[in-house]
Image: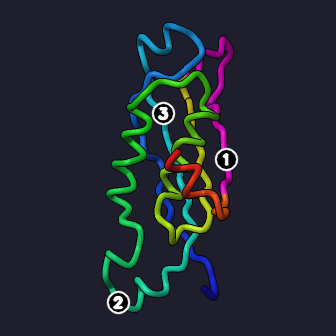
Amino acid sequence: MDSLDEIVLTGLTVFGRHGVYEHEREDGQEFTIDLHLRLSLEQAASTDDVADTVHYGELAEKVAAVVAGDPVNLIETLAERIAAVGLEDPRVQDVTVTVHKPHAPIALSFADVAVTVHRTRTPDTLEDITA
C-alpha cells in the first residue's frame, strides 16, 4: 500500500438518547457525526467497482444505528463505538470520528460541544471489535 486516501462523511445527523442526565435519555436530542476513514483507494479508482471501496451509504446506515441504539453516558463512548464501525472493514487503516452534541445541557450560550477520537488499526483491532 503506497499511500492512504480518505473517505469523509460529515454532518450525519441522528436522533439519540445519550447523556449523563435522565432528561437527556428521556427526551433525546440530535447528534451530528463527522467520520474520516483512511485507506488506499487505488484499486477502487482502477476498477471503478464499489466492492473495492467502503460503501459510504452502508457506512452511514451502520453509524446511524449506533447513534440511535443503546444509550451511553458520554459522547466519548459513542465516538469509540463509531470508530469501531469504521475499522470493521480491514482495508481501513485509521479513522477519525467527531461527535457533535450541539444541544448539550449547558446553561451558557454556545455553538457546539464535540469530542474527536483517532483510532488506528492494530493487530488486535479486529479482535477488539468482535469482543
Q: Amino acid at mark 3?
A: Phe
Q: Which residues are magenta?
A: 104-119
- The count of marks equals 3
Using the numbered discs, state the Cα–Cα distance from disc 3 to disc 1 in whole angstroms.
Answer: 15 Å
Q: Amino acid at mark 1?
A: Val
Using the numbered discs, state the Cα–Cα distance from disc 2 to disc 1 in whole angstroms.
Answer: 32 Å
Q: Secondary structure at mark 2?
A: helix
Image quarter of the N terminus: bottom right
* Among the 4 quarters of the image, the one containing residue 40: bottom right
| Foreground label between 3 and 1 | 1
Tell me which label, 3 or 2, sits earlier in the chain.
3
Q: Which mark is residue 83?
A: none
Farthest top residue in view: 22
Residue 67 position, x and y percent, is 44, 35
Residue at 41 percent across and 67 percent down: it is: 54
- Badge 1 is on which residue? 117
Circle 1: is it few (<14), some (14-19), or many (20+) Cα within 10 Å?
some
Vertical relation: 114 (above or below) 97: above
Circle 2: is it few (<14), some (14-19), or many (20+) Cα within 10 Å?
few
Q: Which mark is residue 31?
A: 3
Asked if the magenta segment contains residue 23, the reply would be no
Asked if the magenta segment contains residue 111, the reply would be yes
Residue at 67 percent across and 47 percent down: it is: 117
Residue 42 position, x and y percent, is 49, 86
Q: Which mark is residue 47?
A: 2
Please name whichever residue, 111 or 86, is drawn nearer the observer in this view of the structure: 86
